[in-house]
Image (cartoon, helix red, strand yellow):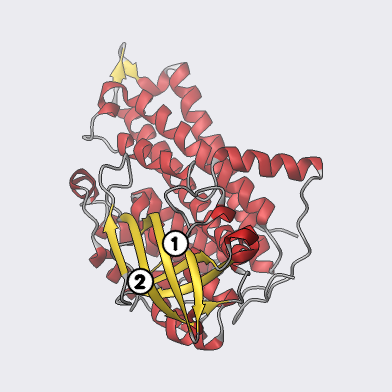
Amino acid sequence: MIDFTLTDENRLVRRSARAFVEAEILPHIREWDERGEAHPEVFARMAELGFLGAPIPESYGGLGMDYISFALLCEELERADTAFRVVQSVHVGLNSLTLLQWGTEDQRRRFLVPQAKGEKVATFALTEPGVGTDAANLQTTARRDGDEYVLNGHKIWISLADLADHFLVFATVDRSKRHKGITAFVVERGMPGLTTGTLHGKLGIRAGNTGLIDLEDVRVPVANRVGEEGEGFLIAMSAIDQGRYTVAAGAVGLAQACFDASLRYAHERETFGEEIGRHQLVKQMIANMAKGTEIGRLLVFQAGWRKNQGLRNTRETSLAKWHATDHSVQAALDAIQIHGANGYSNEFPVERYLRNAKAAVIYEGTSQLHTLIQADYALGYREDRPLRCEPWPAQGFSRPG
């Protein structure tokens, strides 16, 4: 039986995260966004509260949060600004949870523990200048040379590129094998031949660092290879399942922020002698925001419940991500409409919500890709292979079978 009643711990996480963003982010975010400034000192304060190891077991330096709590944390962070939920997505979802599932015990101790404690910042490097959704077509190469691999290639649109200490990099050992040649590696800041840079001129998420990575004859020890040669595509797809969950939860938070801002404005603004909230078409937009946000939250909770049970959740997480991100864009558009001309100004937050929302219908699988995924499940062209991982709380995960 699925029970979505929040536990005392769930409520505590939500209160703690909300108090954090109201004290540390909301008073400054308009200025940071306007200047395009990333503020990694906020990550340090997130680490002090355990946010950077939220769902990681305590035995590896984390808080051992269940996945509903983790979703609520992501929701509250994105209610303030997407940039701070992105940290949860790439550092925790895409990198740390992947090391927990796929890493050796040595790799967990060397990389996962300091990441969970917030001593090191981590990211995920799959996307390339010519490779996005078509992940099997990677151009970055890895050549075995004794006890090392030599990596060459370029990655782009990498969150935290200029701030990360650890990079989970995907490269191919044999391009002719397509996805079966892809292999995963932990690359460390300071390895000769690794350089990073920041991308400027982004539409949104301006308070977050997004950049590129260049790999020129970077020598990576075999001990830093995650999984076996050729397992990288499977590792990347399982990582993206985790990342999509955080994106979906964050999109619910962004939609909630749109809803909250619109409610305030609908009560404050008057036209024709009454609050604009009295006007039927404003009510329609408010009602659709409420409906879509609640549906998104329930879809996230459904995926989170399955994750807590150790059940495969690719279909449910895809559906949650697809709905919640599409809805967050529409919620932001309606919020601007409700605000009228004021919504077009950064005096109000809703224009930032729209700029931020647009990214999430592209990364972690475009809305078009999720449309195809859900259609294939409905038509029976795609099936979830049986998979049972250790239910929460877990000290680790079983590999996909």
In the rendered view, would you say 387 is above or below 287?
A: below
The answer to whether residue 65 is seen in the rendering is no
Q: Which residue is mark 2?
A: 121
**Is disc 2 surrounded by few (<14), some (14 to 19) or many (20+) residues within 10 Å?**
many
* Quarter of the rendering occupied by the C terminus: bottom right
In whole angstroms, how far apart are the C-alphas of marks 2 and 1? 13 Å
Front residue (pair 144, 371): 144
Front residue (pair 215, 260): 215
At label 1, which amino acid type do we have? Ala
Answer left or right for 48 relative to 69.
Answer: left
Q: Classify mark 1: helix, strand or loop.
A: strand
Q: Indicate which label's residue lies in the foreground, 2 or 1.
A: 1
Q: Classify mark 2: helix, strand or loop.
A: loop
Q: Position of residue 132 (x, y in %)?
A: 50, 48
Answer left or right for 64 relative to 34.
Answer: right
Q: Position of residue 271 (x, y in %)?
A: 30, 15
Front residue (pair 123, 299): 123
Q: Position of residue 161 (x, y in %)?
A: 33, 61
Mark drawn on residue 378: none
* Quarter of the rendering occupied by the N terminus: bottom right
The answer to whether residue 267 is seen in the rendering is yes
In the rendered view, would you say 175 is above or below 371?
A: below
Q: Residue at x 26, y 64 (%)?
A: 40
**Is disc 1 surrounded by few (<14), some (14 to 19) or many (20+) residues within 10 Å?**
many
Count of picture labels: 2
Q: Residue at x 67, y 58 (%)?
A: 313
Q: Residue furthest top?
A: 272
In the rendered view, would you say 26 is above or below 102?
A: above
Q: Which residue is mark 1?
A: 125
Q: Position of residue 383 (x, y in %)?
A: 78, 53
At label 2, which amino acid type do we have? Val
